[in-house]
Amino acid sequence: MRPLLAQALIDRGDILFANAAPFAAQKYYRRAIALDGSNSNAVDRSIFLMMQLHTPADVKDAVKVATSFLDRNRDSAVIFADRGLCRLILRDYRGARYDFEHARALAPNNRTYTAAVRTLSRKIAAHV
């Protein structure tokens, strides 16, 4: 029952987000996470929204949400990639590479993750 209720909350959040109400949408995504902490869709939507707001505090909060989820669910390439994008925004290149490496290990056919690892490795090497 919890997964169904969580999905209903996500759907409502999506409607609000599409109607330019990101803060209201975030409340629904957070409720879905509270109801079903293993729901990667709710976590993904919440993180995406925080990245869209693009303030350092929101992006740091997104990293915390992703980390909390990944502490319990290590099998989500999408959430590793989301956290990697957040870390990239925060200029934590080593952390971003770590996350994209894990995403690539979980989804080896995803070329975006492979390209991200390659690009971040070059960026890190250039700054050493």
Image (cartoon, grey):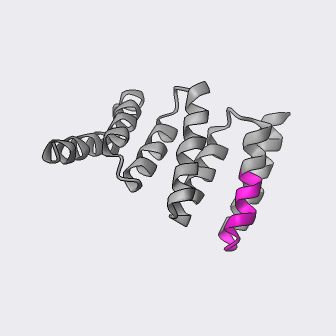
59 or 108, nearer to the observer: 59
* Residue plotted at (80% across, 40% down): 4
113 or 96, nearer to the observer: 96
Characterize the magenta stretch by its predominant secondary structure: helix
Q: Quadrant of the C terminus?
A: top left
On whether residue 76 falls in the magenta region, the answer is no
* Residue plotted at (41% across, 48% down): 87
Judged from this view, the residue extending furthest toward the bottom is 20
Q: Quadrant of the N terminus?
A: top right
51 or 108, nearer to the observer: 51
Tell me the quarter of the picture where residue 81 sits: top left
Span colored in magenta? 18-29
Q: Position of residue 43 (x, y in %)?
A: 63, 44
Q: Position of residue 102 (x, y in %)?
A: 39, 30
Position of residue 124 relative to residue 46, above or below, is above
> Does residue 113 appear to the left or right of 123 in the view shown?
right
Q: Position of residue 89 (x, y in %)?
A: 40, 56
On whether residue 28 falls in the magenta region, the answer is yes
Number of numbered discs: 0
